[in-house]
Amino acid sequence: MIRKAFLMRLKPGHQAEYERRHNPIWPDLQAVLKAHGVHNYSIFLDAPTDKLFAYVEIESEEHWQAIAQTDACQRWWAHMRDLMETNADNSPLAIELNEIFHIDLTWRRLQPVTRCVDFSPLVMSSHEPSVTIGLKSTQRVTG
């Protein structure tokens, strides 16, 4: 997984509208992002400066770059250009940031799997002992 971060800037007075337009994003744009290997995408706002910090996790740089050529992305950029500083093609003016530190503290402990079997449909004699399978104890039933 490739992690990317970049800075963008809103035009003054457009914070609320920027947030409104992202809640939610268009379904076709979301589908394009997913189809192009975007797994996680977050945008944060520094309100006093109008700066946006974006973080994205992608499968490949080529797929990430290809998003810009899609109709959904082109329409989204045109829809957002009045709120943001943009390039001539309406893409957001973005400054890529270099990752200088990363630590993954996800602990993945194996959890015990408990499988329980319910013997209640079975007909057994009353003097058979109870059976313990996993963490569930089932009593044998008489018929």
Image: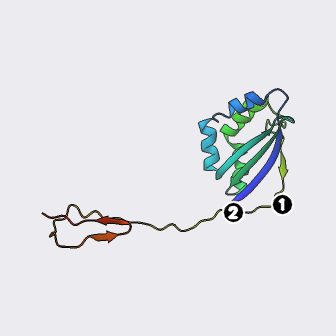
Residue for badge 1: 100
On residue 137, the disc is none
Amino acid carrying mark 2 in the image:
Leu
Q: Judge from the rendering whether residue 93 lies leftward or rightward of residue 16; answer left or right.
A: right
Residue for badge 2: 105
Quarter of the figure that contains the N terminus: bottom right
Question: Label 2: how many residues lie within 10 Å, few (<14), some (14-19) or many (20+)?
Answer: few
In the displayed structure, 46 sits above or below 134; it is above
Q: Are marks 1 and 2 in contact (CB under 8 Å)?
A: no
Q: Judge from the rendering whether residue 140 lies leftward or rightward of residue 96; answer left or right.
A: left
Secondary element at tag 2: loop
Identify the mark nearer the N-term, 1 or 2: 1
Q: Residue at x 63, y 65 (%)?
A: 107
In the displayed structure, 69 sits above or below 117; it is above
Amino acid carrying mark 1 in the image:
Ile
Which residue occupies the extreme left position in the image?
A: 143
**What is the spatial separation of the Cα atoms under label 1 and label 2, in whole angstroms?**
17 Å
Q: Nearer the viewer, residue 142 or 96?
A: 142
